[in-house]
Structures are given as structure tokens and as C-alpha cells.
Image (spheres, rainbow, N blue to C red):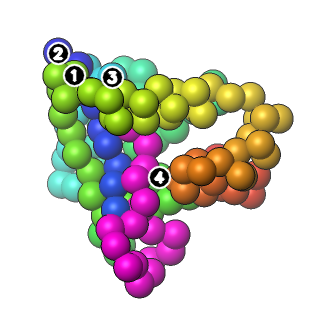
Amino acid sequence: MSIYIELLHGHHYPNEELDDWGFNGPVLGPFPYFHTTYQSDIKLGDKGIIVMGKQVVFPPWDRNDYIDFLGGLYGDMSVFGPEYIKNGLRRRLTRTNQVFRMPINKVPLLLNDPEEWIRIYASHVLGGKL
């Protein structure tokens, strides 16, 4: 069985005052397993997460208890099996995979994307932090 990860409760910066639950982040996967050690090391299988042809480390929680991932800070993470991938989640998973496979020269086009995490990701990549 494969597993997927959904990042939620997105923030732009620590201690940001939100009117609601923040923005939805990417849906990642499939991975063969999810293993964490002392909330500081996460393993997702042999391949991990590939973004623009590079493997990125899926980070542990930062000192503010956020998941700091590609420019966004997330307060929630869900781990689930393929039986939960329906409609909205399937669209977000497809969109995540499309965005992560884009060549670097196309990333500036994402600055006007309607999904907030994608705009943050584009800004993060253009800032040279990948």
C-alpha cells in the first residue's frame, strides 16, 4: 500500500494571525511508507520527494512547531492511503506533481497562480532557497 501526505493550515511566516485555517498546501506521494524518529527525522521510502529533478528533504517540525516546506509553514499534516484520494485531493495531488515537474524557467509563471502554496513555492524557488 502507498501513502500520501497532505499539508494544511498554511502560514506565510511564524505567528501570523489568521482569520481562518490558512491555506492548503501540496499533496505529496505516493510513498511506500512514513516513518518518523523523535519528531526530527522523516523517512518516506528510497526516492523521497523530487522537485524539479532534485530530491528535497521532507523536513521535521521547526522550532515553532511548523512544518517548513518549500517556503510555506504548515501547522497540520495528514497521512493517508490511496482510498482517500478523491475529487479535490486528486486535483491537488495532480497539481502538486505538475508544479514540481516544471522546469525552473517556467517557475516565474507560478507567481500569479490562484493556489497560495504555489505562489509561495515560486517565490521560494526564485529566491534561490531550493
Which kind of residue does numbered mark 2 sit on?
Met
Q: Could you tell which of marks 4 and 3 lies nearer the N-terminus?
A: 3
Query: Could you tell me which secondary element the residue under label 1 belongs to?
Result: helix
Q: Measuring 18% from the left and 54% from the top, which residue is drawn there? A: 38
Tell me if residue 60 comes above or below residue 33 in the rendering: below
Residue 88's image quarter? top left
Q: Which residues are magenta?
A: 10-28
Which kind of residue does numbered mark 1 sit on?
Pro
Tell me if residue 89 comes above or below residue 75 in the rendering: above
Which kind of residue does numbered mark 3 sit on?
Pro
Q: Could you tell which of marks 2 and 4 lies nearer the N-terminus?
A: 2
Quadrant in which the N terminus appears: top left
Q: CA distance from mark 4 to mark 3?
A: 17 Å
Residue underneath mark 2 = 1
Residue underneath mark 1 = 82
The location of residue 96, given as percent across then percent down, is 50, 34
In contact (CB < 8 Å): disc 1 and disc 2: yes
Q: CA distance from mark 3 to mark 1?
A: 8 Å
In contact (CB < 8 Å): disc 3 and disc 1: yes
Please tell me whether mark 1 or mark 4 is closer to you in this view: 1
Q: Could you tell which of marks 1 and 2 lies nearer the N-terminus?
A: 2
The residue carrying pointer 4 sits among few (fewer than 14), some (14 to 19) or many (20 or more) residues within 10 Å by Cα, namely many
In contact (CB < 8 Å): disc 1 and disc 4: no
The residue carrying pointer 1 sits among few (fewer than 14), some (14 to 19) or many (20 or more) residues within 10 Å by Cα, namely few
Identify the residue at the far front of this view. Answer: 87
Residue underneath mark 4 = 69
Residue 65 is covered by the magenta coloring? no
